[in-house]
Image (cartoon, rainbow, N blue to C red):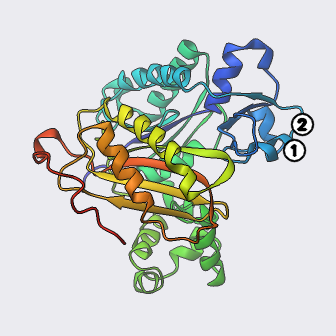
């Protein structure tokens, strides 16, 4: 058997809010909410001072304001956050080439074969956190474990500005008492299904045999079985190729379908411009809609050849709107336009006529 891997999950602490507090001394020590103000805005990040009041990411901004009336609302500045993220990633790469970013503020690192600190993962994580503090004036937390699933749990264990290690010999002892919602993929719906079976902890999940889990939950049953045993064979994959690019917008007020044309055209342009930053070519056009009742629906079309211009992308996205068959009085709060099915340029067929056979549902 090969020796256990050494995986580090690094997670910046309240990243967007911390950048704002770093750059504006007047915000330090105050509850900061990174969000645009408005009825449809959601929280991008909250400082730890705001979290005391129950403010969390993805929460409606109006609710955050009710929970913490004294909060300072700061509009997000993603250009600045990306610049800091690049600084942090450069620090990671000093210690290993196997870095898999998950977002601007977190990443997996495989340091199994790293020469840094003699390959001692805890020392590498400590040094990374010290370098982040010294070079960016920000803090990060880290989890060290034999795989990605466990490392991600561990990084949250001593937040903020801490680290936690789960050695291979203690995996089962660590997992058994955890609530089952700590298992990746177990959201509120799955948590409810497991609770109906009397399963609220990982230890109780561990007791269920694989055939029963697969019978009840299909292919996800095997994932539950493996996670309950601390098994995660996924490698750290650096520089993953682009799979999809999209842009979306939430309206100030709900709109009928026929009023979405301008927004669709603008979002198609935004998505098209974003694709110019990658050499890969997107093939499938996706239109996303969210109704006033928060129902999400998508329509997609994969032409014989990928869209070769903004105008072609825009026309397909607008045509996909005609495939939405909800009642005419339906109102929509969000629309998005995306490209998926990205391929390398040499895999792309010669451009053909995209509009001869646009299918209907």
- Disc 2 on helix, strand or loop? loop
Question: How far from the left and from the top, in percent, is residue 48?
Answer: 75, 34
- Residue at the image position 41 percent from the left and 36 percent from the top: 269
- The N terminus - image quarter: bottom left
Question: How far from the left and from the top, in percent, is residue 93?
Answer: 36, 25
Q: Nearer the viewer, residue 53 or 204?
A: 53
Marks 1/2: CA–CA distance:
6 Å
Q: Quarter-wise, where is residue 281 in the image? A: top left
* Badge 1 density bin: few <14, some 14–19, many ≥20, Cα 10 Å: few
Q: Is residue 304 above or below residue 16?
A: below
Question: How far from the left and from the top, in percent, is residue 263?
Answer: 52, 43
Q: Left of 50 or right of it: where is 258? A: left
Q: Is residue 180 visible?
A: yes
Q: Left of 20 or right of it: where is 204? A: left
Q: Nearer the viewer, residue 267 or 94?
A: 267
Question: How far from the left and from the top, in percent, is residue 255?
Answer: 64, 54
Instruction: Count how many numbered circles sit on residues in the image.
Output: 2
* Badge 2 density bin: few <14, some 14–19, many ≥20, Cα 10 Å: few
Q: Left of 246 or right of it: where is 309? A: left
Which residue does the numbered mark 1 point to in the structure image? 66
Q: Is residue 199 above or below residue 85?
A: below
Q: Quarter-wise, where is residue 25 in the image? A: top right
- Disc 1 on helix, strand or loop? helix
Which residue does the numbered mark 2 point to in the structure image? 69
Q: Nearer the viewer, residue 186 or 46?
A: 46
Q: Is residue 148 above or below residue 95?
A: below
């Amino acid at each position: 058997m090969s020796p256990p891997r050494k995986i580090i999950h690094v997670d910046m602490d309240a990243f967007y809010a911390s950048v704002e507090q770093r750059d504006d001394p007047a915000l330090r020590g105050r509850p900061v909410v990174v969000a645009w103000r408005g009825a449809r805005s959601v929280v991008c990040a909250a400082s730890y001072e705001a979290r005391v009041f129950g403010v969390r990411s993805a929460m409606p901004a109006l609710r955050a304001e009710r929970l913490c009336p004294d909060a300072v609302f700061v509009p997000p500045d993603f250009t600045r956050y990306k610049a800091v993220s690049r600084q942090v990633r450069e620090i990671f790469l000093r210690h290993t080439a196997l870095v898999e970013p998950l977002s601007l503020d977190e990443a997996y690192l495989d340091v199994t074969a790293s020469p840094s600190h003699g390959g001692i993962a805890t020392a590498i994580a400590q040094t990374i956190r010290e370098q982040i503090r010294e070079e960016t004036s920000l803090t990060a937390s880290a989890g060290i474990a034999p795989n990605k699933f466990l490392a991600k749990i561990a990084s949250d264990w001593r937040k903020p500005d801490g680290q936690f290690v789960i050695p291979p010999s203690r995996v089962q002892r660590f997992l058994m008492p955890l609530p089952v919602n700590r298992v990746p993929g177990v959201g509120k719906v799955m948590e409810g299904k497991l609770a109906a079976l009397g399963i609220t902890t990982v230890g109780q999940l561990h007791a269920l045999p694989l055939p029963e889990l697969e019978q009840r939950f299909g292919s996800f049953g095997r994932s539950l079985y493996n996670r309950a045993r601390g098994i995660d064979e996924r490698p750290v994959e650096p520089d993953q190729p682009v799979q999809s690019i999209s842009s979306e917008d939430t309206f100030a007020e709900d709109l009928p379908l026929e009023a979405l044309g301008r927004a669709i055209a603008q979002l198609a342009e935004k998505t098209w411009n974003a694709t110019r930053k990658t050499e890969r070519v997107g093939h499938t056009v996706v239109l996303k809609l969210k109704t006033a009742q928060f129902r999400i629906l998508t329509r997609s079309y994969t032409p014989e050849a990928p869209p070769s211009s903004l105008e072609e992308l825009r026309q397909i996205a607008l045509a996909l709107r005609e495939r939405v068959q909800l009642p005419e009085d339906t109102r929509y709060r969000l629309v998005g336009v995306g490209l998926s099915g990205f391929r390398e340029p040499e895999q792309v067929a010669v451009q053909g006529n995209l509009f001869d056979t646009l299918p209907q549902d």
